[in-house]
Amino acid sequence: MNTNNFKILVAEDEEINFLYIDILIKKEYPHLQIIHAKNGQEAVDFCKSDAQIKLVFMDIKMPVMNGYEATNLIKKLNNHLPIVALTAYSTDDDKKQAMQTGFIDFLTKPINKKKFLTIIKDNLPSSN
């Protein structure tokens, strides 16, 4: 499995949440590159400038630009880029809005480690 050019963008304004996500990824997939966006606008900018980003974890509530707005703009740049919502909001309406926005999945905080790692595995390039 060649993951040398596989980058994951984590859009998360809370540093402690990012550090936890970073540790989860590096423990299971130490060779993956992780990019940290601290707000929605940074996430959009990273996606514009780096075609090697293959998966995005997007917090919904962030400064400058929220996750819904950022995802809408990213999807206009690359409709095939998988984006996963990360949020403390967990109502059925929140999940419905996320899926209508174009997220491929919806993870609530605290993050379910098994589901989180499965999403990464499912989006890694195949070994074929």
Image (spheres, helix red, strand yellow):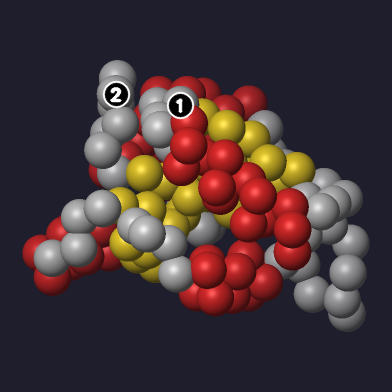
Q: Is residue 38 left or right of residue 91?
A: right
Q: Which residue is mark 2?
A: 63
Q: Residue at x 71, y 46 (%)?
A: 7
Residue 98 appears in which quarter of the rendering? bottom left
* Residue 119: assigned label: none
Disc 1 is placed on an element classified as: loop
Q: Nearer the viewer, residue 52 or 114?
A: 114
On screen, residue 9 above or below 128: above
Q: Is residue 27 left or right of residue 90?
A: right
Q: Position of residue 101 (x, y in %)?
A: 27, 54
Q: Which residue is mark 1?
A: 38
Q: Residue furthest top?
A: 64
On screen, residue 49 above or below 81: above
Q: Is residue 92 left or right of residue 44?
A: left
Disc 1 crowd rating (10 Å Cα; few below 14, some 14-19, many 20+) is some
Q: Is residue 100 visible?
A: no
On screen, residue 59 above or below 95: above
Q: Nearer the viewer, residue 85 or 30?
A: 30
Q: Position of residue 36 (x, y in %)?
A: 57, 32
- Amino acid type at circle 2 is Pro
Q: Residue furthest bottom?
A: 128
Q: Position of residue 58 (x, y in %)?
A: 42, 46
Label 1 close to label 2 by CB (< 8 Å): yes
Task: Count every numbered label the image shows and give the total.
Answer: 2
Location of the C terminus (image quadrant): bottom right
Q: Earlier in the sequence, mark 1 or mark 2?
A: 1
